[in-house]
Amino acid sequence: MRLERSAWCGDLRSADAGSEVTLCGWVDSARDHGGLLFIDLRDRTGLAQLVIDPLRSGALWEQAKDWRVEWTVGVRGSVRLRQEQSRNPKLPTGEVEIEPVDAEVYGRARPLPFGIDVGGEVEESIRLRYRYLDLRRPVLQGNLRLRHVLTKAVRDHLDAAGFYEIETPTLTRSTPEGARDYLVPARTAPGHFYALPQSPQLYKQLLMVAGFERYFQIARCWRDEDLRADRQPEFTQIDIEMSFVGPEQVMTLAEDMVRHACGKAARVVLPDPLPRLTYAEAMARFGSDKPDLRIGVEIADLTAAFLSTEFKGFGGAIGSGGVLRALRVPGGAALARRELDALTVEARQRGAGGLAWFLLGGEGERRVGAAGVAVRSPIAKFLSDGELEALLGATAGRPGDAVLAVADRRDVAAAVLGWLRLWAADRFGLRESEGVWRALWVTDFPLLQWDPDQGRFVAVHHPFTAPRAEDLALLETEPAAVRAQAYDMVVNGTEVGGGSIRIHDRAMQARVFAALGISDADAADKFGFLLEALSFGAPPHGGIAFGLDRLAMMCAGADTIRDVIAFPKNARAGDPMTGAPSVVSPGQLRDLFIRSLAPSGQA
RNA sequence: GGAGGCGUGGUGCAGUGGUUAGCACACCGGUCUGUCACACCGGAGAUCGCGGGUUCAAGUCCCGUCGCCUCCGCCA
């Protein structure tokens, strides 16, 4: 390399006119005007225009006229102001241009499979096949730069708060509970396997037992589950743990960190402190444990108003301990019968017996309340005037709206109306504009949840989460009623982080294992090292983990975390570029004492 | 495991069962001395994802299959 960079393309301004610079980068575009050559040179900072006039620099022109898009070149030349009429206000460097006196080609390029400037519209599998070209796009360059800024701000904030960054193993042991593990066969122990960690959970607790007090890690985690737009098989957590703290200290530290980091990366301004909802309240009002507060409408409870209703569709559900809840859909009176029928089908698939709908305004058969709002509904004739008034009053339904109601078990009503709330937001554009961040804490999650498939209780968060002290007595008698010292941070309907205070008492941990149906022998086998550690003087401790990819996605305004990850996997957890996962040689398998049972043709 | 959408030159798309499968961008050649989405002229480039079926005739209709994306299940 003969020409060594002295300046970045995107930095050049009119003040640089007269100076000599050496630029390196990629040919972004080349325009030939019958000899006069305009070449846009691109590096990671932006574009700079080179001008090469054959009449002024013949030898260099002979060389440059054959340059093609995406070649890598270096040029040395003088910066000069452009003529007044040929300045380009659309370009940060549009005031100036460079007239090279020396040039060097570093690498030629074949025609590209897709244009760098149109990459975003190209099918994603092709983008991933040539990810190194896709990543040249300014959008992705910007996303990964933003991710760097975000990550650095996290490190700076935690360092200033006295946290040590400590690494933990990626080859660890498989633990029951949670997601499917990625397994790694152990050559040195035939028939035995490591697992890649789903999170550094146990290690960070052990670091607290070890006395580090404040730990964090930008930790890679693995979960072998099906993918989504916001889920990858390997992803990155901002993993945090603190000793001698309760929920308040963890939440304060965590929201300060997010406020600082996202403020740096995306100039997001979050309220201080963040609003909070209990899990029970979130489920009742929004039908979700990760409510999207950009949507203005809430779910209304009408159980009390319908306690003595004549209508069996509602009364039956209420009588057997269920609830009647309703959601106003602004503009929903425009819903066609076909759409309402489709919603009813969806509601049934989510476990509801049915979906009651009321269209307000227009030519309804019933007029309700002092304002005489017209109501159209197949079940209006079964309801009294007072009941219809209560329905409209509680939901604030106005002409032009629809009111959708579900009478069912509490959890079913929440699930159906929570889903309908999101559906209505899509259908009628009920969300606040893009760029708004509605962040909150959801607290007091249940500790345990009944799993009908396994026939036992499972941990809602994880098995090491501490119950709330005042609910302890219920652990053996009414496990589902025990609340956890757990908290999630939710932004715009996405869970971006979650954590808990952990159990630091060996006896308490044993009680929770018992509630989970994990036998003493099993607990000793799988978690013996943790129980042992807790018996040697463990501090009260707790922590939280944030999905760095999701935070970066939200800061970048991206639609998928793949756009903030340099080399992501596709929906089948494969990498079209490297061909991973791939078959391996029989010899490799023999070394690991493994024989494949995959159907022939699939190796 | 289930549902939906998509699959046509390198890329993005169009294409009433019936001529030589069309357009834009990219690519190649040419003209042009102030462009920056340069403009203009010309050229090359496709077994219409794959397999089967219906038909005188299939990119188009039917069945199957594969791939990609989204959602549900799943993800402590």
Image: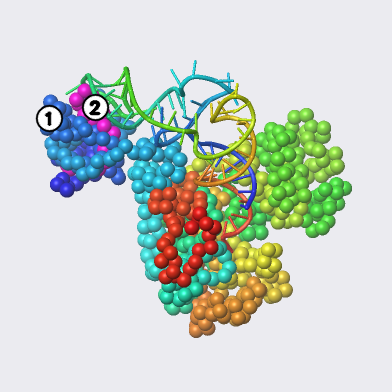
> Gap between marks 1 and 2, in whole Å?
15 Å
Residue under label 2? A32
Give left or right: position of B75 versus A392.
left
The residue stretch that appears in magenta: A21-38
Identify the subunit bearing mark 2.
A
Residue marked by disc 1: A58
From the viewer's perspective, tell me whether residue A109 is left or right of residue A233: left
Residue A278 image position (x, y, % from top left) = 62, 59
Amino acid found under the numbered disc labelled 1: Gly
Q: Is residue A176 above or below residue A278?
A: below
Tell me which residue sits at (72%, 35%) in the image.
Answer: A338
**Quadrant in which residue A472 is drawn:** bottom right
Q: Which element carries disc 2, helix, strand or loop? A: strand
Residue drawn at the location 82% of the way across and 40% of the way down: A379
Give amino acid for label 2: Asp
Contact (Cβ within 8 Å) of mark 1 with mark 2: no
